[in-house]
Image (cartoon, rainbow, N blue to C red):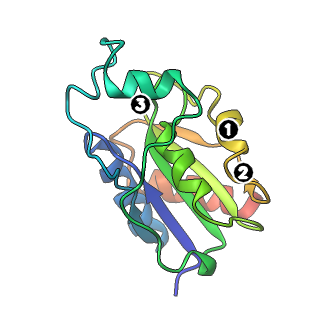
Amino acid sequence: MSQTLVAYFSASGVTAKLAERLAEAIGADLFEIRPQVPYTSADLDWNDPKSRSSVEMKDKSFRPAVANKVENMAQYERIFVGFPIWWHVAPTIINTFLEEYDLTGKTIIPFATSGTSGMGETNRELQNSCPGAKLVEGKRFPKDTTAAELKAWANGVMRNA
């Protein structure tokens, strides 16, 4: 049984590929955070203020429902949580995911994909969603980050967390 989980939400497949690469590189279990109502391309149109993603990200209390659950969350000591950067933070479905579990004593390690945006206020936005857990500073990666680069980063984070 692995004590490390890589959980991820991916709207377009970019974060999924990175999460798979990370999980394989560090020998972690992999879990996809699936929205109960899948996002369409129209939902993801950040140029449309009425698109689903725009509406969700304007209201920080919004919690999109997650369709699936991690079966044995208690076994994990470390949880890498991956997502695309939306409006300089994690999508609110990440808050939903974190809030569904008792994460007391666990280490939460965010990682993100984005063409240009950094992590922004991600940790500040996630802190209240994982009370009792140690939320470490995350990192944004380009989509072509290698398994070796991901492994080196993850090992460094796990050593220092």
The quarter of the picture where residue 25 lies is bottom left
Which residue extends farthest left?
41
Give the mark nearest the N terminus, 2 or 3: 3
* Position in image of residue 10 (x %, y %): 34, 46
**Horizontal placement of 47 versus 19: left or right?**
left
Q: Residue at x 46, y 74 (%)?
A: 27
Q: Are marks 2 and 3 in contact (CB under 8 Å)?
A: no
| Residue 135 disc label | 2
Q: At 69% across and 65% down in the image, what residue appears?
A: 103
Depth check: give the residue in front, 82 or 60: 60
Pointer 1 with pointer 2, Cβ within 8 A? yes
Disc 3/disc 1 C-alpha distance (Å): 16 Å
Task: Report crowding for label 1: few under 14, some 14 to 19, many 20 or more residues within 10 A (C-alpha).
Answer: some
Q: In the displayed structure, would residue 84 be above or below residue 136? A: above
Q: Is residue 145 above or below residue 58?
A: below
Residue 139 x %, y %: 57, 40
User: Mark 2, mark 3: which one is toward the viewer?
Assistant: 2
Distance (Cα) linking label 1 and label 2: 7 Å
Which quarter of the figure is the C terminus placed in? bottom right
Horizontal side, residue 88 vs residue 77: left or right: left
Neighbor class of circle 3 (other Cα within 10 Å; few <14, some 14-19, many 20+) is some
Q: Which residue is mark 1?
A: 123
Dot 3 falls on a residue whose secondary structure is loop
**Camera sees residue 136:** yes
Which residue matches tag 3? 114
Label 2 – label 3 distance at C-alpha: 20 Å
Secondary structure of residue under mark 1: helix
* Amino acid type at mark 2: Leu
Residue 31 drawn above or below residue 2: above
Q: Residue at x 36, y 12 (%)?
A: 49
